[in-house]
Image (cartoon, rainbow, N blue to C red):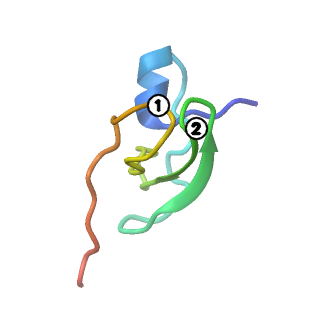
Amino acid sequence: MAEFCAQCAKQYGMKNGFIGECKPNYLATVVCEGCGVIQVNHKGECVSHDCDNGYHAVDWSISNK
């Protein structure tokens, strides 16, 4: 089954397939049908600025808790 990050899901009218793929403040490496191999946050949002779908990645930073 095809999986899409949050941005591609919105663009293509599909379901975000990567929600909860990792814990908050962590990233998971996944294969998005629109972006290719990317990293997503816990909300399923693409954070890879070099993805195949342009520059829709959200910014993220490392938390020093």
In screen coordinates, is 12 left or right of 1?
A: left
Residue 22 % position (x, y)? 51, 62
Pair 2/1: label in front: 1
Q: Residue at x 44, y 35 (%)?
A: 6
Q: Is residue 43 above or below residue 26?
A: above
Give the amino acid type for the residue marked by disc 2 in the picture.
Answer: Gly
Crowding around mark 2 (Cα neighbors within 10 Å: few <14, some 14 to 19, many 20+) is some
- Residue 1, quarter of picture: top right
Give the amino acid type for the residue marked by disc 1 in the picture.
Answer: Asn
Badge 1 is on which residue? 53
In screen coordinates, is 38 left or right of 57?
A: right
Q: Which mark is residue 17?
A: 2
Residue 25 % position (x, y)? 35, 68
Crowding around mark 1 (Cα neighbors within 10 Å: few <14, some 14 to 19, many 20+) is some
Foreground pick, 62 / 25: 62
- Residue 61, quarter of picture: bottom left
